[in-house]
Image (cartoon, rainbow, N blue to C red):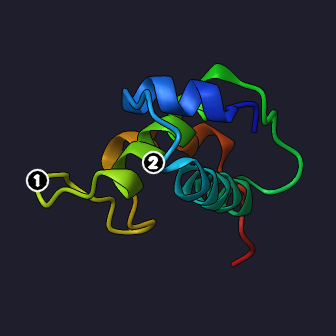
């Protein structure tokens, strides 16, 4: 993933450094989840993947009950929609 801490903090509208460790942890967790979903052979530097990571990070950092979750991934629908084209095919 190409999202760095400064980009993540700007997206979350955070100007202090008190939560940098927590944001980094959540950022890495979001990236790992997206990579597992898409597999190793996807373009991790696509703008849609960056947007998905930022939206998922926002959901993890500011959890809300009013967000509709995808029933398959458990992610916010916007994240799932952005990642669908990168979905790793699964065997039946």
Q: Position of residue 23 (x, y in %)?
A: 54, 50
Task: Please say if 21 is above or below 58.
Answer: below
Task: Determine crowd level at label 2: few under 14, some 14-19, many 20+ residues with C-alpha closer than 10 A.
Answer: many
Task: Please say if 5 is above or below 84.
Answer: above
Task: Please say if 1 is above or below 10.
Answer: below
Can residue 82 be seen?
Answer: no
Can residue 92 be seen?
Answer: yes
Report the front residue among 90 and 15.
15
Q: Quadrant of residue 7?
A: top right
The secondary structure type at the circle numbered 2 is helix
Report the front residue among 10 and 32.
10
Q: Which residue is mark 2?
A: 56
Q: Position of residue 37 (x, y in %)?
A: 66, 60
Going from the N terminus, do you reach mark 2 or mark 1 first? 2
Q: From the viewer's perspective, is 88 left or right of 23?
A: right
Q: Are marks 2 and 1 in contact (CB under 8 Å)?
A: no
Q: Which residue is mark 1?
A: 66
Q: Position of residue 52 (x, y in %)?
A: 52, 38
Q: From the viewer's perspective, is 61 left or right of 66?
A: right
**Quarter of the figure that contains the N terminus:** top right
Task: Determine crowd level at label 1: few under 14, some 14-19, many 20+ residues with C-alpha closer than 10 A.
Answer: few
Label 2 to label 1: alpha-carbon separation: 14 Å
Give the residue at x 20% y 54%.
Answer: 68
Q: Position of residue 77 (x, y in %)?
A: 33, 47
Give the residue at x 43% y 27%.
Answer: 15
């Amino acid at each position: 993933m190409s999202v760095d801490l400064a980009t993540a903090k700007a997206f979350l509208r955070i100007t202090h450094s008190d939560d940098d460790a927590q944001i980094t942890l959540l950022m890495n967790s979001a990236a790992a989840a997206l990579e597992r979903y898409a597999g190793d052979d996807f373009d991790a530097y696509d703008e849609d993947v960056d947007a998905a990571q930022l939206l998922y990070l926002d959901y993890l950092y500011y959890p809300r009950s009013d967000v509709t979750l995808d029933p398959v991934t458990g992610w916010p629908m916007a994240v799932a929609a952005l990642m669908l084209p990168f979905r790793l095919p699964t065997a039946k």
